[in-house]
Image (tube, rainbow, N blue to C red):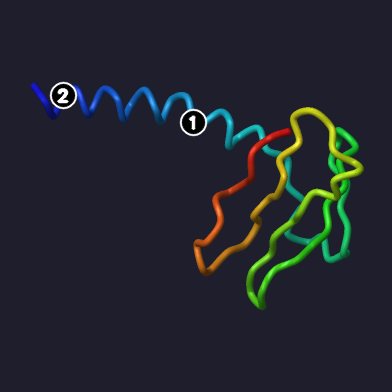
Amino acid sequence: MRSSIFACAAMALSMTAAPAFASIEKPSDEHKGQWWTNSKGCRYSRAGVPGETMWFLIINTARKGCPTYITTKSHTGMYKAHGAKI
């Protein structure tokens, strides 16, 4: 009984979390510039340690629905796929 409750909870969580991750717009792997602008007009600046690519929101360009950061490549696993949306 207990394991079936946990299984149902895990399934419900995965169904609600998946669309949020799928809806995050990211720069292409070929994008090599320092800055990137998404379709909502939010601008991001590239940062990260060697081998890791993070995009941090330039705060004065923030719009509703834009994540505070985007992880496109991470070997440390320190960051989630994206930060909280504004």
Q: Earlier in the sequence, mark 1 or mark 2?
A: 2
Residue shown at the point (88%, 64%) measured from the top left: 33
Residue under circle 1? 17
Label 2 sits on a secondary structure element that is helix
Position of 7 with respect to 46 (left or right) is left
Identified by mark 2, the residue type is Ser
Residue shown at the point (55%, 50%) measured from the top left: 80
Residue under circle 2? 4
Label 1 sits on a secondary structure element that is helix
Identified by mark 1, the residue type is Ala
Taking the view exactly as shown, the residue that stands out farthest to the left is 1
Residue shown at the point (69%, 35%) measured from the top left: 85
Taking the view exactly as shown, the residue that stands out farthest to the bottom is 50
Q: Position of residue 78 (x, y in %)?
A: 52, 61
Label 2: how many Cα within 10 Å (few below 14, some 14–19, many 20+) = few
Q: Quadrant of the N terminus?
A: top left
The image quadrant that residue 7 belongs to is: top left
The image quadrant that residue 60 belongs to is: top right
Q: Position of residue 23 (x, y in %)?
A: 65, 32
Residue 81 higher or lower than 24, as above or below? below
Q: CA distance from mark 1 to mark 2?
A: 20 Å
Position of 58 with respect to 80 (left or right) is right
Position of 29 with respect to 58 (left or right) is left
Residue 11 higher or lower than 56, as above or below? above
Residue 5 higher or lower than 80, as above or below? above
Q: Position of residue 82 (x, y in %)?
A: 63, 46
Q: Quadrant of the C terminus?
A: top right
